[in-house]
Amino acid sequence: MCGIAGVIDLSRRPIPGLTKRLELMNEIQAHRGPDGHATWAHGRGAVGFAHRRLTIIDLATGDQPMRDEAGNWISYNGEIYNYIELRAELGDPRFRTTSDTEVALRAYERWGADCVQHFRGMFAFSIWDEAKQTLFCARDRFGIKPFYYTEMDGILYFASEIKALIPFLPEVETDPQALKDYLCFQFCLEGKTLFKGVRELLPGHTLTVRNGHIEVSRYWEVYYRPDFGHQSAFFEHEIQDLMGESVALHLRSDVPVGAYVSGGLDSSIIASLAAETQGPDFLGFTGRFGTDPAYDESAYARELAEWKGFQVLDVDITARDFVETIKKVIYHLDYPVAGPGSFPQFVVSELASKHRKVLLGGQGGDEIFGGYTRYLVAYFEQCIKGAIEGTMHSGKFVVTYESIIPNLVALRNYKPMLQEFWRDGLFENLDRRYFRLINRAPSLGDEINWSALGQYDPWESFQAIFNGANVGKESYFDSMTHFDFKTLLPALLQVEDRVSMAHGLESRVPFLDHRIVELAATIPSDVKFENGNMKHVLRTAMRGKLPERIVDRQDKMGFPVPLQEWLTTPGPVRDYVHDVFSSQAARSRELIDNRRVLQGLESEVRFGRKAWGLLSLELWQQAFHDQAHEFRSRITTPTQEVIQ
């Protein structure tokens, strides 16, 4: 786990001050690799890499950027978990280290761009191919590890975090289309970022620079092709085998490994499987908002730990922690994304970093196996429609309204959302209904200067992903989970990466092994979602690994934060947020009217995301727009001249 960065002149002209540019990028990303740093600049001065190292595998060697005998160089971030098997398959006597980095470099020598097809893991890397005079970059299939890039004056810059690119941007500006995406979904679509001119390399894609041109292509896709030839027991057995194998691979490390334990199904599965291998020295970490039982799920984490025989360390998270931490969270995220869970996860990661360098987490289970309550909401509507129209048994549904009713207790905390969802557009087309279900923009009004954001409509981007050719038209369930897998999951992985790396901590996600994902895409929806039971096949497959109370939970809500209570009760959070929106800078924003935002803060509904989203945007502007000159000032006078 590390931080990477690089620079290349597309016309292969020498870049003035190349080494200083690379050193600056390394400095900005120092938190990603506290154990070492180095740069490499090509002899011709037209390309160079930077690297920050967090030592996890091969502690003695494996420093980067790394070179082979042919003059190829690599700067690599992540873990290739099957590196031991690949090393044996490559059978190369020239190996000088026991690192997975060298395996990646040797794999590129053997298979070229197809090397990524052989990797099981999380990665973002760049390779300079000396013979072909080509830059080859790749990102893992799911976007676990980040890769951002921008082109300025014929020079391509790339890095693990956008903040390392900011000194080279002529100005820090908001991308209006990306902002529209964020206002709808609280994440961006199709590789956009909130920074104008900066893009992310999409998951499962490669970027190649050859002959002065940047080429981006996809190397992996998930295809939803239901296997109706097998029954539930077959899929349960496959899940058990693949989950066990994936956790075992993810435990490969030369330093001790722990786990996030939230008390939910997914993190509990991972921690349970890991503890079986690691024994009593295994450590779990969790957090709680102890002032309100509704926000304290730590009892489930402790129950699992007692049941499996390992220790859980926890942290009590307070309103004062929010005030002292939230600016750091937004800074490390690079730009706002997803919900307020990033804040408590940041605090838990800080605790974990004092005891472990590597943590396993349950990210991905909801998007792969269908764990979000909104899937139940959407299907409930379709069941009602089918019953009215007499098409309930036409094959378009995975559950009937009779069977779904006992599971509707899971909607207990979602009544305000249901009221809003069914107010308009009842029984519209499936894509339009799911868009309504996840679209947060209707809660925003004249706080936003919509006319300044242009004509772009996020609905069009949504529709293209939701109705993708890789998803069968017969399954509403697959379409919903596919959209979240392609969009929400990378956003959550952005959070996962940043809040852990902010503390020099590596976060691993065993659900996101491509063999598990590809298997899940073949499981028929009525097996995954039997009788409206979310993640039914996963629960059934892993039942013997968990206490019954955790397996059968229907009240899990992620990592909820009592933000609405804090905003409407006199105290440090309310005072802090009012101060944020009352500043002169906040009141002078072009795209957001923060005076109106301030007026509507106390109307936030419980578990609402409007206040969080707007607060995040304002703190982001303060950290990056208002401080852009600070990033550029880190380039001293002699270096300043080289980037003009």
Image (spheres, rainbow, N blue to C red):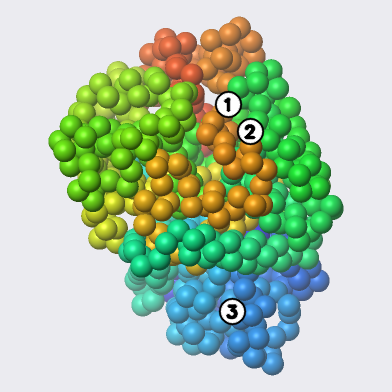
Residue 617 at x, y percent in the picture: 46, 30
Q: Position of residue 533 (x, y in %)?
A: 45, 42
Q: Residue tagged by mark 3? A: 105
The earlier-in-sequence mark between 1 and 3 is: 3
Q: In what element is the residue under mark 2?
A: helix
Residue at image position (49%, 57%) is 143
For badge 2, the amino acid type reads Pro
The first of marks 3 and 2 along the sequence is: 3
The residue under label 1 is which amino acid type? Val
Residue 12 appearing in the image: yes
> Mark 3 Cα within 10 Å, few/some/many (few <14, many 20+)?
many
Spatial CA distance of label 1 from label 3 is: 43 Å
Q: Secondary structure at mark 1?
A: loop
Q: Which residue is mark 2?
A: 344
> On screen, 166 above or below 451?
below
Instruction: Identify the residue at image location x=56%, y=82%.
Output: 107
What amino acid is labelled 3 in the image? Leu
Separation of disc 3 and disc 2 at Cα? Answer: 37 Å
Whichever of callouts 1 and 2 sits on the residue coming sooner in the sequence is 2
Which element carries disc 3, helix, strand or loop? helix
The outermost residue toward the left is 389
Asked whether the residues under the numbered discs 3 and 2 touch, taking CB atoms below 8 Å apart as contact, a structural biologist would say no
Cα distance, mark 1 to mark 2? 8 Å
Which mark is in front, 1 or 3?
A: 1
Tell me whether circle 1 and circle 2 mark residues in contact (CB < 8 Å).
yes
Q: Residue at x 47, y 75 (%)?
A: 117
Which image quarter holds the N terminus?
bottom right
Q: Residues within 10 Å of mark 1 (few under 14, many from 20)?
A: many
Residue 578 horizontal side relative to residue 152, left or right: right
Residue that badge 1 annotates:
561
Q: Position of residue 361 (x, y in %)?
A: 63, 49
